[in-house]
Image: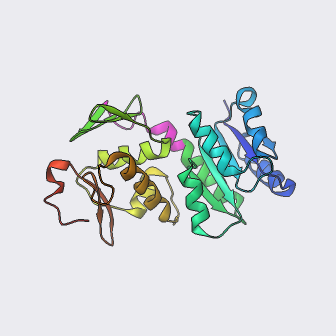
Amino acid sequence: MRKKILVVDDEPSISMLIEFNLKLAGYEVRCVSDGEAVFDMLKPFRPDLIVLDLMLPKMDGIQVCRELRKQNNGVPIIMLTALQDVTDKITGLDNGADDYMTKPFSPQELISRIGAIFRRLQTLPGASDETMISIGRLAVHVDQREVYMEGKPIDLTPKEFELLLFLSRHKGKVLSRQQLLHGVWDYHFLGDTRIVDVHISHLRDKLEKNARSPEYIMTVRNVGYKMHGPSTASESSLA
């Protein structure tokens, strides 16, 4: 069955360009031109992914992201923005977007990123035989895609979960930002590594007692990040 993609953009020329290229790539596509229409399409169309413009009438892309995540809807979202300021991109990620692209963009790169997200969703559950990974007080339930800290559930976005799972499966190994982009986002091209830093920051806010002095996700200066057990974190010179 073909994957369904909902394109949300109020510029007809961009919607038509995206729709044309996605259909050529084999996807089923629907287009809407305002944020409120997204919620009208959720049940009848059931999109597998949403390509969402940031600047929209009635309800902007940030509001759409926020409302979808508030409803516990984990549909992957790629946000499109004409804004170059990294703060605007980070705001989209803060509110539940899985990825972002800045206009103007290459339709081929958009298709590549969409394919990467779908590959991650398909391969993640069966990537290994373990059903739970336990690190200190942290428990990652792989099949259920659930995370607990000291027995209490932690609410993560789909991408935050994938990042935590990847780090947990490589506990003790230093991973560069580019390795994380490849392993979690499946980027085979040079990507913006700030997307990694934003998601790491979110994970620390949700998992760590003190995000400024982490016990689990350690920064390795000038390299990347490392998953550490709390029993040995204090022995590390990392910050």
Most frequent secondary structure within the magenta stretch: loop
Q: Position of residue 21 (x, y in %)?
A: 76, 51
Residue at 61%, 54% (x, y): give it.
Answer: 112
Can the viewer see residue 72 in this picture?
Answer: yes
Q: Position of residue 62 (x, y in %)?
A: 65, 51
Can the viewer see residue 29 in this picture?
Answer: no
Residue at the right extreme?
Answer: 12
The one nearer the camera, 227 or 153, is 153
**Quadrant housing residue 100:** bottom right
The one nearer the camera, 22 or 100, is 100
Which stretch is magenta? 119-131
The one nearer the camera, 41 or 88, is 88
Residue at 50%, 37% (x, y): give it.
Answer: 122
Q: Is residue 125 magenta?
A: yes
Q: Is residue 58 left or right of residue 95?
A: right
Q: Position of residue 13 (x, y in %)?
A: 86, 57
Residue at the front extreme?
Answer: 210
Q: Is residue 3 magenta?
A: no
Residue at 53%, 63% (x, y): give it.
Answer: 189
Q: Is residue 104 left or right of residue 211?
A: right
127 relative to 56, above or below:
above
Q: Position of residue 133 (x, y in %)?
A: 27, 37
Residue at 77%, 32% (x, y): give it.
Answer: 40
**Quadrant housing residue 127:** top left
**Quadrant housing residue 210:** bottom left
